[in-house]
Amino acid sequence: TLNPTELKRFINLLVETTARATRRNSELEQELSTASKKISSLHDSIKEIEHDAHTDFLTKLANRRRFDKSIREALRASQRDGAPLSLIVCDVDHFKTFNDTWGHHIGDQVLKFVAGVLRKNTKGQDIVARYGGEEFAIGLPNTALADAMTLAENIRAEIARRKLVSKTTNEDLGSITMSFGVAQNGPGVNADGLFRDADAALYRAKGAGRNLVVPAETEERRSA
C-alpha cells in the first residue's frame, strides 16, 4: 500500500507519462500526415511526368509513342473480341508552303486548329494523336471502314470550309485542306501493317489531287 506521498508521486508520474505518450502520438500523426502528403505529391508528379511523356506539347493530343502503344492494345482487343478496328492517317496539304508564307507561329496555330477539329469529331474510346509534323492519326475501335470513311469525310469538309484569320493581325490566311487514308484491320494484320495500309492510302490521296479521303486497298485489289 502506497502512502499519500508515494501515491501523489505515482499519479504525477502516470500523468507525465500519459502526456509524453500523447505528445509523441501527436508527433507521429503529424509525421505520418506529412509523409502522406509527400507521397501524394510525388504520385501527382509521376503522373504529370508520364502524361507529358505521352502528350504532344503543341496540340495536347497523344504523341506518337502513346499512339503506337494504344493502337497495339486496341488491335489486340479487336482480334480477341472479333470487333472491327479502323485507322485514319491524315496530314495538312502543302503545309511547308503555308509555313514558309505565313511563318511557323501561324503554322503552329493551324496545327492547334486541326487538333481541335479532330478532338471535337471523335469520342472517348478513339485514339487521336499528332503522329509527327503535320501528320495526325486516329485509331477507331469498334468502327468499320465505311463509318471511318464517313468520319474522315466529315473532318475533311469541316477543315476545308473554315476560313482562317490571324489572331494577332486579323489578316485573312485563306483556308487549308487535308488528305486522308483509311484502313480497317483484317486477319493477320498487325499494327505496323495497318498503319502502312492507311499511309499508302494517304499517299494515293495526295497523288490524286489532295483534299480527299481514300480507303486502303483490299488484299483482293492489291493482288489484282
Image (cartoon, rainbow, N blue to C red):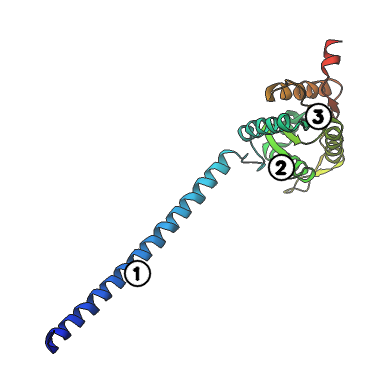
Above or below 6: residue 215: above
Q: Which residue sits at x=68%, y=30%?
A: 76
Of mark 3 and mark 2, the one earlier in the sequence is: 2
Q: Which residue type carries mark 1?
A: Ser
Q: Quadrant of residue 34?
A: bottom left
Crowding near pointer 1: few (<14 within 10 Å), some, many (20+)? few
Q: Residue furthest front?
A: 1
Mark 1 or 2, nearer chain start: 1
Indicate the amino acid at tag 2.
Lys
**Residue at x 20%, y 82% (from the top left corner):** 11
Farthest residue toward the bottom? 4
Q: Which residue is mark 1?
A: 26
Dot 3 lies on which element?
Answer: strand
Residue tagged 2: 112
Query: Alpha carbon of mark 3 to alpha carbon of mark 1: how far?
Result: 64 Å
Q: Position of residue 196 (x, y in %)?
A: 73, 21
Percent x, y of residue 38: 43, 55
**The C terminus, quarter of image:** top right
1 vs 2, front mark:
1
- In the picture, measured across the screen, residue 157 lies left or right of residue 188, that is right
* Nearer to us in this view, 134 or 119: 119
Judged from the image, the secondary structure of the residue bearing numbered disc 2 is: helix
How far apart, in angstroms, are the residues tagged by discs 3 and 2?
A: 18 Å
Crowding around mark 3 (Cα neighbors within 10 Å: few <14, some 14 to 19, many 20+) is: many
Q: Write down the quadrant of residue 114 in the picture.
A: top right
Q: Mark 3 sits on what residue?
A: 180
